[in-house]
Image (cartoon, rainbow, N blue to C red):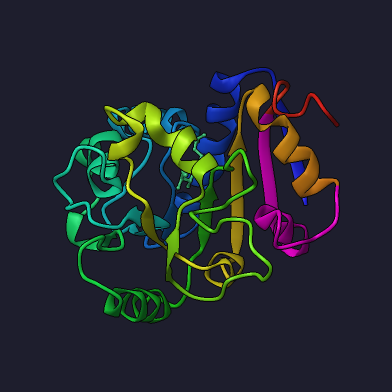
Amino acid sequence: MRIIRTKNYEEMSHAAAQLIAAQITLKPNCVLGLATGSSPVGAYQQLIQWYEQGKLDFSAVRSVNLDEYAGLTPDHDQSYAYFMRHNLFDHVNIDLANTNVPSGISGDDECTRYDQLIANFGGIDLQLLGLGVNGHIGFNEPDDHFSLGTHKVTLTESTREANKRFFASLDEVPTHAYTMGTRDILQARRVVMVASGENKAEAVKQAFFGPITPSMPASILQFHPDFVLVADEAALSLI
Ligand code: GLP
């Protein structure tokens, strides 16, 4: 595990974008595992800027997103499919047909289909992750075991509470989601996590400087052979 320590969100975003850009340069038709939430937005903005300057070409890139809220259609403005178009896909030359977000409305067959899709791609070259305040990755919540493939989860109250800022009220935050499993994430050849702000400091400390345990899902990344944590000083303030 490597840690890239940055001063603030802006520097964190720049450093993470450099790793993603390096992956695209190394393998133009790479498979990127992408994430939502506020943490990766700055990195996406940097990638868009490099694309606009002609420094980056997404035309052969393929992508698979981590997760989606159950019950939200891709055109719902809080769906992760919408988030990805709005924050990245609509602004670069990626072929939308090569982008994938789990469907929130297709039922449980979606889980098998999504894992098959990742397998057909030959796995993920670089997986980008955020970190939940309770240590979740994707929507893999604290549990008594690490999850395997894509599955449906019940969101914890703490996650719904943390994500309610994007919705009109807590009642509107979906109670369930579809997420890639921990095994799917761990099988990516490279993993890059972005973490920013004091509210992530406790999770960073427990996940990467404590025991590997499914009660802190991100802790399993300690086992990954090519894992980089890109975090700002506030997120690293407890270590
Ligand atoms: C959501 C997403 C996660 C994300 C987490 C942290 O629950 N499913 O993939 O990492 O929120 O979000 P943020 O980056 O906004 O703190």
Q: Looking at the image, is 197 positioned above or below residue 225?
A: above
Q: Which residues are magenta?
A: 210-231
Note whether 40 is above or below 178 in the view shown: above
Q: Is residue 44 visible?
A: no
Task: Out of 154 and 179, give the one closest to the viewer.
Answer: 154
Instruction: Residue at the far front: name it.
Output: 171
Tell me if residue 183 can be seen.
yes
The residue drawn where x is 73% and y is 39% is: 204
Rendered-image quadrant of the C terminus: top right
Q: Is residue 198 left or right of residue 104?
A: right
Residue at the image position 50 percent from the left and 36 percent from the top: 17
Q: x and y percent of residue 96 in the render?
A: 19, 54
Number of callouts in the render? Answer: 0
Viewer-side residue, 185 vs 88: 185
Position of 123 compared to 16: left or right?
A: left
* Residue placed most toward the observer, 80 or 160: 160
Quadrant of the image occupied by residue 32: bottom left
Whole-percent x, y for residue 41 in the image: 42, 31
Give the quarter of the image for residue 217. bottom right
Q: Is residue 92 above or below residue 227?
A: above
- Point out residue 236 in the picture as x, y percentages from the top left corner: 76, 29
